[in-house]
Amino acid sequence: MSLGQLVARGDVLGLLRYPLAQISGVTVTLAAILSALLALGAAWGISVVVRRGIRRYGTLHPNANQASLYTVSRLAHYTVLVIGVLLALEITGIPVGKFAVFAGAIGVGLGFGLQAIFSNFVSGLILLFDRSLKVGDFVELDADLRGTVRAINIRATLITTNDNIDVIVPNAEFVNGRVVNWTHGSEHRRIRVPFGVAYGVDKEIVKKAALEAAERVPFTLTGDDARAPQVWLVGFGDSAVEFILAVWLNEAAARRNAAIKAAYLWELDSALKRHNIEIPFPQRDLHVRSLFDLRGADALAALHGTPSPVDRPVQTSAPAAALAAHERAALARNDAQDDAVRGLEEDAGADAARALRDTNTAAPGAPAAR
């Protein structure tokens, strides 16, 4: 009986059993197609329920490893879908072994257009099992791309920057390229904030001002003596003595970058001004001022050869505040040397590093440990 006759008679069972196509000796009917679609829909529904259950478990148990729960969720999703596809093929009447004929064609396709897609899929599985990159990690791909990993999908990974911009990165880039994971082993990290002061300024006062600036920033890690803020003298530039404020950040600030550094620079500027410490200008400006020993309008007037008001007092920098003996002794510690010795204690053993520290203490003129 033809399809038209079945429709005219309203024979539903006949329509469901009507052969639509013949594939390698297998008859495909409408009932088989509907059953296969039902199996796929059921598999998708089960996957949604399982993922919601895992997500709810993570919400009710905040101390659980959220990255592990995400990995289990993705693997369960893929597994249920694969089972659903195999079941749909079996219901349709197409044995899985029949697809061996298409294995060669699929291999050729992977060699051409599907190669990148297959590579990203395998890379996504590697990321889920390797755990070198997890949901919630803060990563850096290049100087302009930093953000938090939000999802590791079948083809690409979703990264959200601190400016709330979503960036979709193919999974293969994380496997084949170099990625900086700022929160892989620990939530704490240290930043180095460079700054410079004019020559002739007391370095202990500079250190005091920088440490005060670090204390005023709420992102500074406190309560850990081994990770206390440090001030390093790192160079003598053309017009400035160059320092670095090395600060360990707490967990709340470990996922920020530019804004955190700007916060420390803001407080550094305030602290240096509070202690009357001069931030230098280029050398040519210092040379003109030292030649005329004048500032502002008086220096410009002398430079142009115009008369300057005699009764105008010459503006000079206010003297820096003096330090008490005990305060100067505490600030005189060489933070860079202490940091190097602490690193030696971790790498080469405490005894060898302690001997090196004792040697440096006994010989004040000895160079600092590197």
Image: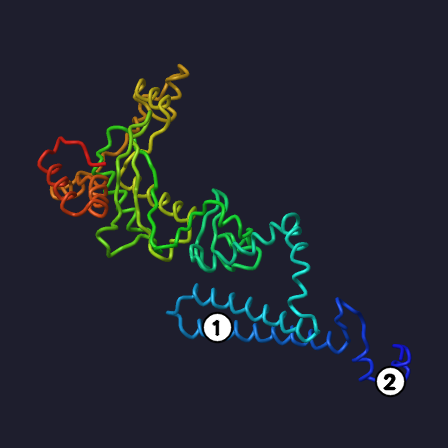
Against 279, residue 166 (above or below) is: below
Say if 141 sits above or below 320 in the image: below
Outermost residue on the left side: it is 362
What percent of the width, then of the height, locates residue 283? Answer: 35, 23
What secondary structure is found at the residue carrying circle 2? loop
Q: Secondary structure at mark 1?
A: helix
Residue 54 marker: 1
Which corner quadrant holds the C terminus?
top left
Q: Residue at x 77, y 73 (%)?
A: 27
Near mark 2 (Cα within 10 A), the count class, few <14, some 14-19 or many ≥20, is: few
Amino acid type indicated by mark 1: Ile
Question: Where does residue 238 sit, x and y in percent of width and height?
Answer: 33, 24
Left or right of 322? Residue 17 is right
Q: Is residue 316 above or below residue 258?
A: above
Percent coordinates x, y for residue 102 in the rendering: 68, 59
Q: CA distance from mark 2 to mark 1?
A: 46 Å
Please state which of residues 44 and 198 is positioned toward the viewer in this rendering.
44
Q: Which mark is residue 10?
A: 2
The residue closer to the viewer here, 187 or 313, is 187
* Residue 13 left/right relative to 256: right
Q: Residue 344, located in which quarter of the rendered image?
A: top left
Of the 4 image quadrants, the one containing the N terminus is bottom right
Residue at 50% of width from left, 68% of height from top?
A: 73
Q: Position of residue 234 (x, y in %)?
A: 28, 34
